[in-house]
Image (cartoon, rainbow, N blue to C red):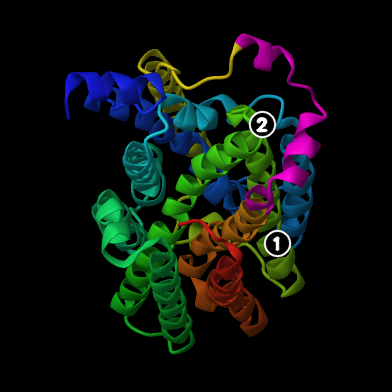
Amino acid sequence: MSEADKRDLEAKGFYKLSWVQRFGFASGDLAQNLIYQTVASQLMFFCTDVYILGGDRSKAAGIASTLMLIVRFVDMVWDPIVVNVPYGAINSSLTRDNDEITMLTSLRMWCANIGCFFVYTLLFLFIAIVGGTPIPWDMILFNLFGNIPNLCIVPFMPAIKNLIGKKNMFYVFLTVAVAGNAILYVASRMNANDWWYRIGNLIKSTGVCVATGYQWALVPEVISYGEWKTGRRISAIVNAITGLFFKAGFALGGAIPGWIIQASGYVSPPAGESTLPKDPMAWFTTLSIYFVIGFIILVFCFTQTKERVVMEEGQTNSVKVSDFWTEFTRNPPLVVVSLFFIVSFVMQNISNTSNNYLMNDLYKQKASAQEAIRWTVCVIPAILAIIWYDYYFQIQFN
C-alpha cells in the first residue's frame, strides 16, 4: 500500500495501530479482571464460607445473594453514567479497521485472561501462603486446566474466525462448552478421579473462552451500523447500553447460585473442615494487593491510548440522555447483542460463582445440596449455552 493510500484510509478513520498501542489498550482488561473477576467469582464464597454473612452458616448464601443482587442492580443503573464505559468505548474510537478491531479484541481478551489466571488459578495459592494454611492443590489444578484455553487459544481467535467463519465459530465452541459441562456433571455424580474434573473444565473453558471472548468484537460492528444509519458514531452510548445488559447478567448470574444452594440445604463447613483457606485476614491482604496492582495497570492503559475516531464537537454537544432509548429502539443489532450479553453473562457468572463449592468437600454436603451445586456449575450453564446458541441465529453480522 502506498503512503498516499495509507493517508487516505487514515483520514477516513481506518488506522493501523502499533503494538504498543494495542497492548496499551489491552492492558486495561488485565487490570479490570484482577478486580472484576475477583468480585465475580469469589464474593459469594467469601460471604458464605469465610465471613459467614449474617452469622448463620445455613442462611448466609441466601442473604449474600439478595445483598449482591441489590448492590449490582444499583451498579447496573449507574453504569450508563460511569464505571467501565470509557474503556469499552475506546475500542471503537481507536480505528474503524475491522482487522485491527479483531486484533484489539483478541489482545484484550488475552490480557483479561491473564487477569483471570491470577484470580482463578493463583488466588487460593496466595491466600494459603499468606494465611499459613495448606495449599488447596486440587482447586488450583482444576482452575489451571480451566485457564489453559484462555491463554493458549484466545490469541488465535482471528485465525479461527478466518478459517471457519464468525457464525460457525460460535456454534462449534458453544457445542464444546456444553460437552465440557456434561463431563463435569457425570464426573461429579460418579465421584470420579480428579483428572476427569480437570479435563471437563478444560473442554468447557475451551468452548466458553472463544465464544464469550469474541462477543466483544460485535460491539464495534453495532457502533458502525449505527453510524451508517444515522451518521453519528456514539460509541459511548452503545457501550453504556451493552454494559447495562452485561451488568444485568452479572447481577442475576451472581445471585442465582446462592438462592439455589441455600434452598437445597447447603451449610458452610467450619474452617477446620474445609479444603479451601478461610482466614479472613489472609483474604483481605491478598485481595488488597490485587486491587492496588489493578489500579496501577489501569492508569498505564489510559496513558497509552488515543481516541481518533470520534464525533465532531457539534455531534457531541447534541448527545442527550434520551439518546439511550432512541439508539436502542432504532438499532436492531444493538437489541440483539444486548440480549445476547444477558444470556452470556448469566451463564458465565452462575458457573464462576459456583466452582468453589464443587471443589470444597462437595461430598460432605447432603445429597440435595450436592445436586444443587452440580446444577449451578454444569447443568444451568449448559442450558443457557444452548439458548445462546439458538439465539445467535438471529444475529446477521457478516
- Is residue 344 in view? yes
Number of marks drawn? 2
Q: Is residue 107 left or right of residue 262?
A: left
Q: Choose between 2 and 268: the one closer to the eye.
A: 2
Query: Can residue 55 be seen by looking at this rendering?
Result: no
* Quarter of the image that includes the C terminus: bottom left
The amino acid sitting under disc 2 is: Ile
Mark on residue 237? 2
As displayed, is residue 389 above or below residue 67? below
Task: Name the residue nearer the viewer: 222 or 79.
Answer: 222
Whether 322 is among the magenta residues is yes
Query: Does residue 270 appear left or right of residue 129 in this picture?
Result: right
The magenta span reads: 313-335
* Gap in angstroms between the C-alphas marked 2 and 1: 29 Å
Residue 102 locus on image (x, y percent): 36, 44
In percent of width and height, residue 48 lies at: 65, 54
**Residue neighbourhood size for the residue with mark 2, other residues' Cα within 10 Å, grouped as few (<14), some (14–19), many (≥20):** many
Q: Nearer the viewer, residue 57 or 151?
A: 151
Q: Looking at the rendering, in which quadrant would you find the N terminus?
A: top left
* SS of the residue under disc 1: helix
| Left or right for 295, reference 230 | left
Q: Are marks 2 and 1 in contact (CB under 8 Å)?
A: no
Quadrant in the rendering for residue 97 = top left
The structure residue drawn at horizontal position 60% and vertical position 76%, both measured from the top left corner, is: 383
- Residue 358 coordinates in the image, percent (x, y): 50, 69
For mark 1, what is the residue? 256
Q: Residue furthest bottom?
A: 190
Give the label, 2 or 1, closer to the camera. Answer: 2
Magenta highlight on residue 347: no
Q: Residues within 10 Å of mark 1 (few under 14, many from 20)?
A: many
Q: Indicate the secondary structure of the residue bearing disc 2.
A: helix
